[in-house]
Image (spheres, rainbow, N blue to C red):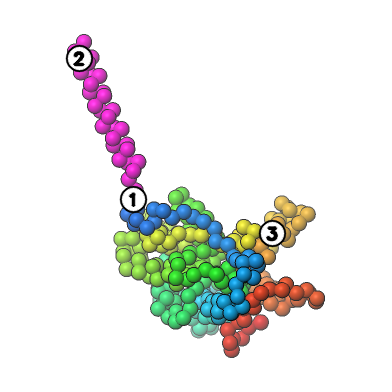
């Protein structure tokens, strides 16, 4: 009887200890940055026409003059045809466009980072863009196979404050990590980029060289580093909630819409204020350039409140 009571008491004590340990583990969080605890992922939408109409003409003009985009395009000599296509098409509409390469090329001009590793090269490019930003407060990071409509990007961030940490694009989730897909383009505000460049100095939080056994893609690693600074991925959308950043080509999206929305293919495909399309061939980029900037249906006027003019003196369509 005594031995049974002793066993019962031991069980009670061990059970209590086990519950206490579980409660400690449940309240433990590996992230020590206090400012990250209250953040909840949300969707960033472009301003509606009604919202813009509430602004005075002077305020609209002020915003128009302030919005400038620095384009950071990551290239390699092996994708020279895509590099050339991006140079000849949409990048002409960036207020500033810099091509960053893994090694120099005699054919096209770029900033040679002399770096083979994708993540280390992206770090160097972003640091260079930040240090040479001047008055520019928005940064767009893209691959050479991405086509971007910069005017639509300006419209998305028009009423957003670049002194707030924005990290925008097409968000996807991998485990517990939410990040912006590189294929669809990555947008960073000045504040987000400033925090990122600062955390580059902390090798524990944001190492330059990753382990060969556990290596993340550069877009995931970017999200990890930004997370330590309290900056989280946000999905860019139009006023109807449709995504603006596409990690696929136009023909791929239209083909899918033809199967899924045969009665309304165009509307089912993409937002009419889309910012990016990815995996575009050089020929497709030229077709997009013609369709976006040259082809006009006579008699149609979209009555847009603002006009984003390309940089002065630029050779653009």
Q: Secondary structure at mark 3?
A: helix
Please name whichever residue, 247 or 243, is drawn nearer the observer in this view of the structure. 243
Q: Answer yes or no: do the residues labelled 1 and 3 have beta carbons within 8 Å?
A: no
Crowd class of label 2 (few under 14; some 14 to 19; many from 20; radius 10 Å): few
Q: CA distance from mark 1 to mark 3?
A: 41 Å
Mark 1 neighbour class, 10 Å CA radius: few under 14, some 14 to 19, many 20 or more: few
Can you say whether 300 is above or below 223 in the image? below
Q: CA distance from mark 2 to mark 1?
A: 43 Å
Q: Position of residue 154 (x, y in %)?
A: 57, 73
Kindly indicate the quadrant of the structure image that contains residue 269: bottom right
- In the picture of the structure, the residue carrying the numbered disc 2 is 3
Vertical comparison of 295 with 33: above or below? below
- Disc 3/disc 2 C-alpha distance (Å): 74 Å
In percent of width and height, residue 181 lies at 52, 61
| Residue in the picture at 71% in, 74% down | 303
Of the image marks 2 and 1, the number of the one nearer the N terminus = 2
| Residue named by callout 1 | 30
Give the residue number, with chain letter if any, for mark 3: 269
Q: Which residues are magenta?
A: 1-29
């Amino acid at each position: 009887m005594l031995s049974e009571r002793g066993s019962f008491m031991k069980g009670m004590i061990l059970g209590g200890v086990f519950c206490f340990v579980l409660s400690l583990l449940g309240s433990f969080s590996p992230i020590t940055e206090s400012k990250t605890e209250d953040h909840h992922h949300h969707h960033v939408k472009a301003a509606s026409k009604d919202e813009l109409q509430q602004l005075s003409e002077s305020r609209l003009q002020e915003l128009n003059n302030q919005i400038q985009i620095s384009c950071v395009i990551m290239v390699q000599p092996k994708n020279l045809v895509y590099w050339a296509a991006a140079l000849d098409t949409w990048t002409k509409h960036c207020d500033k466009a810099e091509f960053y390469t893994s090694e120099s090329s005699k054919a096209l001009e770029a900033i040679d980072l002399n770096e083979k590793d994708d993540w280390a090269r992206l770090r160097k490019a972003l640091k260079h863009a930040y240090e040479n930003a001047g008055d520019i407060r928005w940064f767009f990071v893209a691959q050479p196979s991405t086509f971007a409509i910069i005017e639509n990007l300006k419209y998305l961030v028009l009423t957003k404050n670049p002194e707030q940490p924005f990290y925008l694009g097409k968000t996807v989730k991998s485990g517990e990590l939410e990040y912006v897909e590189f294929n669809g383009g990555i947008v960073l505000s000045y504040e987000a980029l400033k925090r990122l460049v600062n955390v580059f100095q902390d090798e524990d939080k944001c190492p330059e060289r990753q382990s060969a056994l556990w290596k993340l893609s550069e877009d995931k690693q970017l999200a990890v580093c930004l997370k330590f600074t309290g900056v989280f991925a946000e999905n860019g959308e139009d006023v109807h909630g449709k995504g603006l950043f596409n990690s696929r080509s136009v023909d791929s999206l239209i083909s899918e819409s033809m199967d899924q929305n045969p009665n309304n293919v165009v509307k089912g495909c993409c937002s009419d204020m889309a910012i990016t399309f990815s995996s575009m061939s050089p020929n497709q980029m030229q077709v997009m350039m013609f369709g976006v900037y040259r082809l006009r249906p006579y008699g149609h006027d979209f009555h847009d409140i603002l006009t984003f003019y390309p940089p002065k003196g630029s050779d653009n369509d």
